Every structure is written in structure tokens, then in C-alpha cells.
Image (cartoon, rainbow, N blue to C red):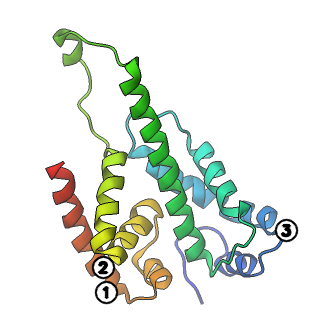
Amino acid sequence: METTPHHEPPHEVTQILKDWSEDASARLMPLVYEELRRLAREYIRRERADHTLQATALVHEAYLRMVDGKNVTWKDRAHFYGIAARLMRRILVDHARAHNAAKRGGLEQKLSLDEARDLPAPGPTDLVALDGALESLAKSYPRKSEVVELKFFGGLEANEIAEVLQVSQKTVLRDWSFAKLWLCRELSAA
């Protein structure tokens, strides 16, 4: 029996995904919606304080992109959440790039030193920098990059990642440890 920390019935989700048809999207959404919202809230929590994308919008955009594919072949719920993680990452990175482009386009205001002193220190991870580092990691270590994506963006546990990537749980844990160190070094160098 498949075990899961998620709230939806795993066998029901897997069965709907395997029997994908016209009405599958409507049957699947109520089963996965809360878990996708939880994941989206986690991603957005890591974003900058003035982030304008809401968790609900992120879920809806990712879900529409996932179920819009005509030739979708889902393996199981872990595969579904892995794809959801990738799409949410792409959406957030695109949103961050658009935000950065708007800033470069002259929307930034100059502040005096007194005004700047009162601003909060930057805290959340720069998603564009993380995306670039992940792409760099993927060139040399593709599986390790997938582990990060599935864990960080997909919220999957080590056993679920092992299932998606068809490796052992120990391999996933080793890959995760390596990737964290590699990304920390890469992001601090940038």
C-alpha cells in the first residue's frame, strides 16, 4: 500500500491519473487541490515580501498547464506532484523575471540614505538566482537537480522522490546533501 503524508487518497489519485480521460481533470482537482495550495503557499512564503502572485493563482495556473496537455501520460501521484513542482517553479521564475525586468525599466525609485536605513534587510531566496544555479547543477548533475526540484518545489519526501526517480531512498538523501552544499556554494559566489 502506498503511504503518503498528503490528505488525498493516494490510490484514487493514481487511478484517475492512469485512466486519464476528458473528465479526469474535473475528478482530480478536488482530490489534489488542498495539497497543491499547501505547496504553493510554501513556495510563496520563500518569496520576497512584496510578491504579488497568490497561492490560489499559482495553483490554478500550474493545474491548467498540467491538464491542458492532450497526450498526458501520468505514472502515479508522485509523478503528478513532480510535474506540478516543475511547473510552479517555472511560473514563479517567470514572475520573478518579469518583476526584475519592470524594475530595470525605470520603476525603481531612488531613496536617500535615511529612507534606505528603514527598509527591511533582504531575506527570501532570489528565485531567479536559484533557478540559474539549478540549471547549472543540472548540466553536471541532472539527477541531483531533479531531487532538489522535487523536494524544494514539489514538497515530496525522500521516499516519494525515490519512487519518481526510480532510485533508492539512500541515493536521494545523498543527492540532496550534495546538492544543498553545491547550491549554497554557487549562490554565495553569486
Please name the residue that numbered disc 2 is placed on: 173
Q: Residue at x 63, y 49 (%)?
A: 61
Q: Residue at x 39, y 33 (%)?
A: 100
Give x and y (percent) for residue 120. 26, 27
Please name the residue that numbered disc 1 is placed on: 170
Query: Are there few (<14), some (14-19), or many (20+) residues within 10 Å of tag 1?
Result: few
Give x and y (percent) for residue 178. 22, 73
Q: What is the spatial separation of the Cα atoms under label 2 and label 3, in whole angstroms?
A: 38 Å
Q: Mark 2 is on which residue type? A: Leu
- Mark 2 vs mark 3: give the one in front: 3
Q: What is the spatial separation of the Cα atoms under label 2 and label 1, in whole angstroms?
A: 5 Å
131 w.r.t. 105: above or below: below
Q: Residue at x 31, y 86 (%)?
A: 170
Instruction: State yes or no: discs 2 and 1 in contact (Cβ < 8 Å).
Output: yes
Give the quarter of the image for residue 112: top left
Q: Which mark is residue 70?
A: none
In the image, 167: left or right of 136? right
Q: Mark 1 is on which residue type? A: Lys
For mark 1, give the secondary structure. helix
Give x and y (percent) for residue 70. 75, 68
Give the quarter of the image for residue 153: bottom left
Q: Which mark is residue 22?
A: 3
Query: Are there few (<14), some (14-19), or many (20+) residues within 10 Å of tag 2?
Result: some
**Earlier residue among tags 2 and 3:** 3
Q: Along the line of sight, which residue is nearer the eye, 67 or 180?
A: 67
Query: Are there few (<14), some (14-19), or many (20+) residues within 10 Å of tag 3?
Result: few
Q: Residue at x 61, y 67 (%)?
A: 7
In the image, 17: left or right of 166? right
Q: What is the spatial separation of the Cα atoms under label 3 and label 1, in whole angstroms?
A: 39 Å
Q: Is residue 50 visible?
A: no
Give x and y (percent) for residue 174. 26, 80
